[in-house]
Amino acid sequence: MNNALYYNGPMKPKKISRFKPLLMLLGTMMDKWEGTYRKCLRPYRHLCISTIHQSAFHMPPIKTSNFINYACPEIIDTQWMGALASQFTNVIFNGHQTSERYGEMLPKILVKIWLHKWLTVMALMPVLAILLAGSALIAGEPEWNPDDIKECDRECLIGIMDGYMNALFEKDTGALPPLSIDVRMTENTGVMDVGEGVLWRFRTEPTGFKIYVADPVSGQVAQQARLKIGGRDALVAVRLKVDRGKIQEIEQLYDREIDQAAIPLLTTPVPVLTTDVPPEQRLSRDLLFRVANSYFDALEGDNGKIGAFSDDCVRHENGYQTVNNPPPGGRMMPAPFIPTADTEQGREMLRFSMLTCEEQINEKTFAHMTRIRPRRALIIDEQKGIVATFPLFVHDGTRRGAPDAPPGMLLNLVTMETFGIRDGLIQHVEPFPIVNLPYGLGNGWTKGSGR
């Protein structure tokens, strides 16, 4: 035993007054925690003993009957408590002084009644925390029962998406569907917490235009929509990954620079993206995946025949039809500007706008797209015959087939690109929102992407 803690001689009154506030605090806290200690640790007596011996103090078992009312009487011993009390006194009163100097100021009776019990409780607080945390986990997670497993089908995934969007509109994170403990969220490729970012911080309102893509096999669902952000039209894409009923990934993209000229094609989604495919006509997941990827293969290869295009394939980019426009032609790029036939350049642009998906690629107009990777064909909706991708377009300033050409487009962009597929061919391509990034930046999800 550390004799410095037990002093039978007189104590000067000024010494008592010096420590009176501390001793009162110790006594109050000890009284409050002692009841909780008895109540919470008694059911875990055997585990408490094992944990303290093996994990906390690395001390051998020592049996005693001094503190039989506590949960772990076997490890409480006078010699052990004396050693801990000496260290505790040293730290509490002055870390760089010896315990004897201040220990001799404490009367024996206070140490035995207050400090002894206080240290017992304090020594076991880490164990208490561990056990309470374990109890919470046990209480929060039901026992394994395969009959309780419920598959999250397409309707379930869309319900989770609607729940997420409604909470976003109301700016109420408390109304969100359950989130995974390791949920990860990005907005325009930037990593942030749920509740941060433009979509959460600004007033955001729905419109009647939205496209769902749901994939029960991968547990993912996405939505393309026209929303009002701060009262202005904006194009938004949101992807959620759901794992065992909880949202694990959130990916948000938005573009607020939307001209009124784009609104007509952003009022009602085209039927091929919203209509169910008859069960007997549905394609396999593997074929849908390959068809979607053939689009990017064709762009990278400057060869339209690589892509699985139907003759009537149409592309709407940010709300503008840029391919297969009827005569006399229309837009060839996602912008309000419509070329006119009174100049040679205008006539050429009108001609290009009337070409098919395959023909436009054959003209090598997209040779400035260095690479389209990763493509992230993530969501395959067999019921609707659509595939949602989240590709990263990399433009490094060069152009295929023109090594001596001056530097061209130098930037990256991300988008959600949805493909409507029928009879194994791409009928419709809907890329939006188009989010431009500085060259070198990645998609926020794939390490090393961007170059």
Image (tube, grey):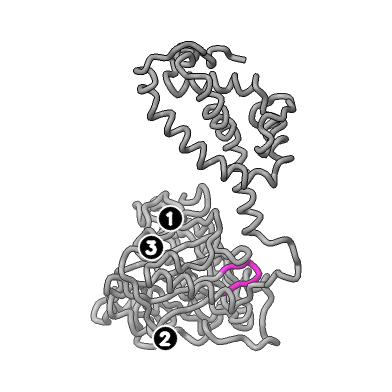
Marking on residue 435: 3
Q: Nearer the viewer, residue 326 or 47?
A: 47
Is residue 22 toward the left or the right of residue 66 in the image?
A: left
Label 1 to label 2, Cα distance in Å?
32 Å
Across and down, in percent, residue 365 comes to 42, 67
Residue beneath disc 1? 193
- The range drawn in magenta is 214-220
Instruction: Give the residue type that dot 1 points to.
Output: Asp
> At which x and y percent is residue 254?
38, 66
For the residue pair 149 and 197, the one nearer the viewer reads as 149
Ranked by sequence position, the earlier of labels 3 and 1 is 1
- Name the element at disc 2: loop
User: Position of 85 compared to 72: left or right?
Assistant: left
Tag 2: residue type? Thr
Q: Which residue is mark 2?
A: 268
Which mark sits nearer the N-terminus, 3 or 2?
A: 2
